[in-house]
Image (cartoon, rainbow, N blue to C red):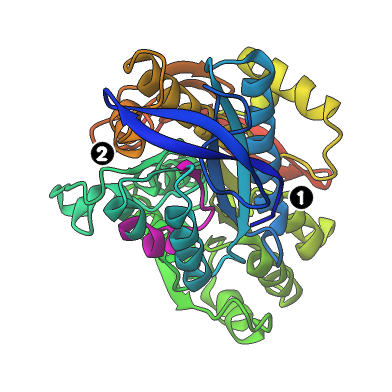
Amino acid sequence: MRNRSLLILTTTITAGALTLTACGSRDDKGGAGNGDSGNVTVTIGLDAPLTGELSALGLGIKNSADLAVKTANKKQYVKGVTFELESLDDQAQPSAGQQNATKFVADKTVLGVVGPLNSSVAESMQKVFDDAKLAQVSPANTNPALSQGVNWSTGDKKRGYTSYFRTATTDAIQGPFAAQYVVNEAKKTKAFIIDDKKTYGAGLAGTFKTEFEKLGGKVLGTEHINPDTKDFSAVATKVKSSGADVVYYGGEYPAAGPLAKQIKEAGAKVTVVGGDALYSPEYVKLAGATAAEGDFATSVGAPIETLASAKEFLANYKAENYKEAYEAYGGYSYDSTWAIIEAVKKAVDGNGGKLPSDARAKVVEALQGVSFEGVTGKVSFDEFGDTTNKQLTVYKVQGGAFKPVKSGTFGS
């Protein structure tokens, strides 16, 4: 965490609220104040891969959260509260994510955390946050077990962590939505299914397979790969010899791009399909425009460029001159951050205009009832902390870039 000059604040508890009094100054983050008596600084944490192969997505998440914080402060959206964003890099590694979660918990000014990108990283963070009653809102996690328990597929759904929320819909919908499109629209019925053995990839591939077979498709082969090797020649040969007309890959674009390229180079006449972690210009770069042409990826929600609700976000993002694109999760990151801001506002408004002494618990409680029109549409959460927005979009690589070809919900 960075150092900066702040006023030292003595804190007393009065009628359940934090009363702040300016006393002096020091160079650290020693309290929930910004230097003005009666005004507090609330930190929103941000965890994402800010370096490494998935940093394009992570930096889009960070920038969009930053924009939400700046907008709230500019509007003075919560009277008496100044928001600040504190970003930590998890490098898409669960161990780093858990360490970051511990750091956020230790900082008492943090009242909510946006992120992470990866479902496997979220698994490592959930208990740390829940034990501290610290809200977590992910713009990108899609594994159903995070909110509905490991037995969700059997109908035995149990919410394990009341502090966990997400604005992205789950793979319980995304996988079947892709299968429906592949069979009914793309007319592909012979699949080779590959996954990277990670929480997100394996789970997504599993939900695709179940629906694909239910629709009459035949799975001609399955394979698990190590995404770090980048040499997929063996599996590429298996795909070619299988006679499959579609490859479904459960995983992320750093491996998906080289995998698609090598499968095509092996002579397999297939379309490669994957989930939201393939929906990035980086996939096309890694696969090569020629090899990627015609491939599909599903992603959460509708293309925000087509949404009236996203016009202000798009204009403001451009005006801020961020170096990186908002990518697939930018709108969801903004909405995740704004959900925390709305929850803080509820907590303050419900406590006579002051931050309550049990602010973290009150923010978690308030998040469950948050409802507003966001960048991506209506933002609210169901009994599991999952988004009520179940819309998805299929994107096809056309002319070297992903273009939306179908939006809807599973079954539509």
The location of residue 313, given as percent across then percent down, is 69, 22
Three-letter residue code for mark 2 = Phe
Q: How many marks?
A: 2
Q: Return the x and y of residue 266 as percentages of the image width and height.
A: 71, 77
Residue 281 image label: 1
Whether 130 is drawn above or below 371: the answer is: below
Q: Residue furthest bottom?
A: 234
Look at the image and say whether residue 377 sits in the magenta stretch.
no
Indicate which disc residue 384 carries.
2
Describe residue 246's horizontal placement relative to residue 205 as left or right.
right
Amino acid type, residue under disc 1 in the picture: Pro
Residue depicted at x 65% and y 14%: 75
- In the image, residue 102 above or below residue 20: below
The tag earlier along the polypeptide, 1 or 2, is 1
Q: Examine the structure image and report whether residue 120 is included in the region drawn in magenta.
A: yes
- Magenta span: 110-127
Residue 11: give its label: none
